[in-house]
Amino acid sequence: MKNRTLVAAGLMASFVAPSASAPAGVPVPVVSARAASQAVSDQDIARFWAAFDAINAVSDPAERLRLIQTLYIDPGTPGLHALMAARRYTAQQYVDAIVNWPNFWRSVRPLTARSRQAVTSLNDDVARFRRLYPELRPASITYAIGVLRTGGTTTGDKVLIGAELALGDETVDVSELPAPLRTRLGVFFASRPFANNAQNNIHEYVHTQQQETQGSLAQQVLREGVAELVAELITHRKPALPVYIYGPTHDAAIRQRFMAEMQADNYDNWLWNSASNPFGVSDVGYYVGYRIARSYFDAARDKRRAVRELIELRYDDPAAVHALIDRSGYLVSR
C-alpha cells in the first residue's frame, strides 16, 4: 500500500461481521490470551490534545507553532516521527488544521480515547498470523494524530496508525473540510472505520512483511490485495466500503480496464483516489488486488505455502508479479 490514504486509508470499513468459520483449508487456531504482548504505543495522542488546548488558548501564529513543536512533535515517539516523515506532515500543517477545523477536532477527540480498546484483539490476531505464516517478523504499532492523510501506513518494521481517522465513526463532523476531502471522509466515517480496526491493523502488519515497490499498477495493486486477503484470513473481516460492493457487479469491465492499464505506472484510476475516476468509486485497485490474491489462494492445494508465496513475492520484479497474476487465473475471460 503503499499506505491507506484518506478513505483508502485503509479501505477500513464497517458493517462487517466475523465469518462463521476460518477460510477453507486454513485451520487458524484459537490463541491463548497469554500470547506475547504486541508492542503498541499511543502516548502521542494525549500529547496532541495537550498541544491542541494550548494552541487554542493563544492567537499568536509564532506561539502556536512553538507549542505544536514543543508539546507534540519534539517529545513524540519514533512512531510519530516516522508517521510525519511518511506523510510529510509539518508543524504548520498541524496548526492550520487545528485552527481551521475546530468542529472536526472536537468531534473526533473523544473517539481517539479508543486507542486501547482498538488493540484488544491484536495479540491474538498476531499470534494467528504467526501460526499461518511462521516466518512473521515482529513489528511495532503506533497510534498518533496526523493531519488527515492516512489512517494507516508503514515504514520498515513500524505500523503507523492515524488515530484521527482510524478510530472514527459516523459522528465525526466533516462540514468544515474542503472538497473533495469533505466528501471523501464523509463516506469513510460513515463506514465506521473503528469497527474494522482489527482488519486495518493486520493489513498494515502484512505490509511490514512485504517488499516495497515503486513499480507498475499491477505491482502496487497486488501488494495491496495480498494485505487485504491475509487480513481477512486472520480477522475474518472483509472491508465493505463501496468498492467491495461495486466490484463484484462490475467485475468484467474492471478486469478489462485493468488489463489495459496494469503495466503502466499511473495509479490515478485505481489507488488512493477520490470517486472522480472512470468507476465513480474510490480505490478499485484494492478490489482487483484482493481478487487476484484470493483466486491464487483458493486454487492452491497448500494454503500456507500460498500465503508465504503471496507475502514473499518480489514486488519489485514485474516479471514475478505478472507470473503470479497469470497463475491466479483472475484475468482469464469468464
Image (cartoon, rainbow, N blue to C red):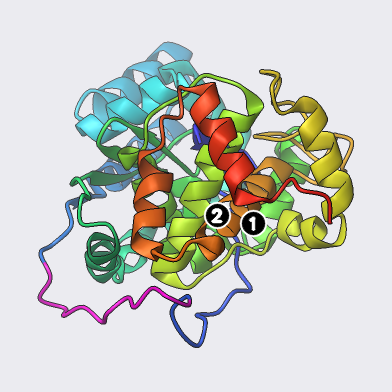
| Residue 33 included in the magenta stretch of the image | yes
Disc 2 and disc 1 in contact, CB within 8 angstroms:
no
- x 47%, y 22%: residue: 317
User: Which label's residue is closer to the chain start, 2 or 1?
Assistant: 1
The residue to which callout 2 is attached is: 296
Instruction: Describe residue 106's horizontal placement relative to residue 126 as left or right.
Output: right
Q: Reply above or below: 234 against 143.
A: below
Q: Where does residue 4 sit, x and y in percent of width and height?
A: 53, 40
- x 27%, y 68%: residue: 128
Looking at the rendered structure, the secondary structure element under dot 2 is helix
Toward which corner of the image does residue 274 lie, by quadrant?
A: top right
The amino acid type found where label 2 is placed reads Tyr
| Residue 141 included in the magenta stretch of the image | no
The amino acid type found where label 1 is placed reads Phe
* Magenta stretch, main secondary structure class: loop
| Marker disc for residue 189 | 1
Residue at the extreme bottom of the image, as rendered: 20
**Residue 312 shows in this picture:** yes
Q: Where does residue 92 sit, x and y in percent of width and height?
A: 47, 17
Q: Reply above or below: 117 against 22.
A: above
Q: Nearer the viewer, residue 145 or 220?
A: 220
Q: Which residues are magenta?
A: 24-35
Front of the two marks 2 and 1: 2
Q: Where does residue 302 sit, x and y in percent of width and height?
A: 39, 64
| Marker disc for residue 14 | none
**Residue 111 shows in this picture:** no
Q: Nearer the viewer, residue 84 or 107?
A: 84
- x 41%, y 24%: residue: 86
Instruction: Describe residue 15's horizontal placement relative to residue 311 as left or right.
Output: right
Tell me the CA gap for discs 2 and 1. 32 Å
- x 82%, y 54%: residue: 251
Label 1: how many Cα within 10 Å (few below 14, some 14–19, many 20+): many
